[in-house]
Image: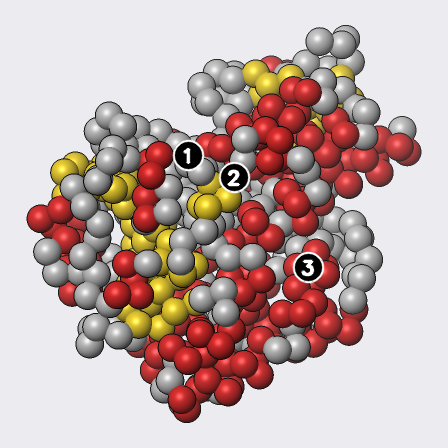
Amino acid sequence: MPSMLDAVVVGAGPNGLTAAVELARRGLSVAVFEARSTVGGGARTEELTLPGFRHDPCAAAHPLAVSSPAFRALPLDRYGLRWLHAELPMAHPFLDGSAAVLARSVGATAASLGPRDAGTYRRLVAPFLPRWDTLVRDFMSLPLTALPRDPVTLARFGLAGLPPSTWLMRRFRDEKARTLLAGLVAHVMAPLGGFATSAIGLVFLLAAHARGWPVARGGSQAISDALTAYLTDLGGAVHTDYEVKRLDDLPPARAYVFDTSPTALARIAGFGRAYDGYRYGPGVFKIDYALDGPVPWTAPEARAAGTVQVGADSAEIGTALHDASRAGRAPEKPFLITVQPSVVDPTRAPAGRHVFWVYGHVPNGWTGDLTEAVERQLERFAPGFRDRVLARATAGPPQLAARNANYVGGDIASGAVSGLQALLRPRPTLFPYATPHPAVFLCSSATPPGPGVHGMSGHNAAKAVWRRLRQT
């Protein structure tokens, strides 16, 4: 290791690894330090239940990763990353056995919403889908890190996306479309009436049509392993089992980049109350299942989907979000996001068996057990589900926070995606990656563009670091 590194990165999650790769690609000397024994952060894979069943403890389906401008610019396929696409990116079943779907085809998606809303859906996505690659780059970058390539489309997207999703839902006449949209917004645990929640729904819709919602072959760990292997080939170093409690624990460097929560950064760097205004959102209760067969969904579409949203209607979803985020109680009928990787990836489980990933929202720091409520909800849409269970691994907010320190109180979004914090994270500033110390930077999901496995927070932060280092 050189006597003085150009950059030290703390945290080997997707954003930390991406920041390290971007700096190493520019010829800088970089080292990454990770407290856990493996890299990955929110993109890892482990045998949590039984031998041969490979589960993703955190993220599993990756609509933002496969569309990420940062990842698409890197040769990750050379390092083993393979995207696998189910027949349908996502399905949302209903109690009558029907389903709304997010298909790669706009027409198939529109048709699933019913004749009264099909045209409205087509008109909603039509202005943006042909320009998706440019739009997603502009949307996930800041003006100070990259000037918009298509400012007109970005502005049009802003007009459609900044209002609450409840406004967007009013465009549709029937409940299927409204429920589908409500479920999409709930992926970031945002209240349906919150600022810019329409943008969240639109991004997930457009991502499905443009590039799908795939899983990584072998598990989400493949994303992190590919980034690590590429970084190593670029001359970067990764050190695991290295917990950083203060800056003095790190080797000398011209810049320090933290893929951590703002809370941890303030503690390690001695920033005092610098991020006291940063808010954390609801937590989740996560269950990983080993099953002796596929999930017995009543709706055929759900059996063919990689991701399945579970909530009877938009009102039920809204109530579940309200209970977890504002009422401080666990919902009786939790909204569930589920992923069934082994529908498309046979490497995840022994022959004929399946892995199944599910979580529901709970209050931040909640210490109860949501297992019964989750399985009761699943049985409404997949009768006989419990009979398929071979083993389960549960993790509430305390366990999730212990597993990944960025998930404060079980908040997998690393900060509430509500109010101005939906866009201006971690503070209202044009320089979100900068900190009170000129040589210290933040690159986690607490910075724009926010949560998800996409590496863009790390990509954008690396640009800020690069500009700083060129000036010194």
Quadrant location of residue 308? bottom left
Q: CA distance from mark 3 to mark 2?
A: 20 Å
Looking at the picture, which amino acid does disc 3 mark?
A: Asp
Q: Position of residue 41 (x, y in %)?
A: 48, 33
Residue 133 bears which disc, if any? 3
Q: Is residue 8 left or right of residue 414?
A: right
Q: Secondary structure at mark 2?
A: loop
Residue at label 1?
218
**Colour treatment of the image:** secondary structure
Q: Nearer the viewer, residue 119 or 17?
A: 119
Q: Position of residue 271 (x, y in %)?
A: 63, 34
Using the image, determine if residue 322 lies above or below residue 413.
Answer: below
In the current view of this chain or complex, which residue is farthest to the right? Answer: 471
Using the image, determine if residue 179 lies above or below residue 328.
Answer: below
Q: Secondary structure at mark 3?
A: helix
Q: CA distance from mark 1 to mark 2?
A: 9 Å
The residue that appears at 12% across and 60% down in the rendered structure is 383
Q: Position of residue 373 (x, y in %)?
A: 17, 56
The residue that appears at 78% across and 57% down in the rendered structure is 143
Residue at label 2?
82
Using the image, determine if residue 12 lies above or below residue 206.
Answer: above
The residue that appears at 46% across and 22% down in the rendered structure is 38
Q: Nearer the viewer, residue 197 or 208?
A: 208
Using the image, determine if residue 413 lies above or below residue 233.
Answer: below
Q: Is residue 396 left or right of residue 72?
A: left
The reply to whether residue 239 is visible in this rendering is: yes
Q: Is residue 171 left or right of residue 462?
A: left
Looking at the picture, which amino acid does disc 2 mark?
A: Arg
Few, some or many C-alpha atoms within 10 Å of disc 3 (few <14, some 14-19, many ≥20)? some
Q: Are marks 1 and 2 in contact (CB under 8 Å)?
A: yes
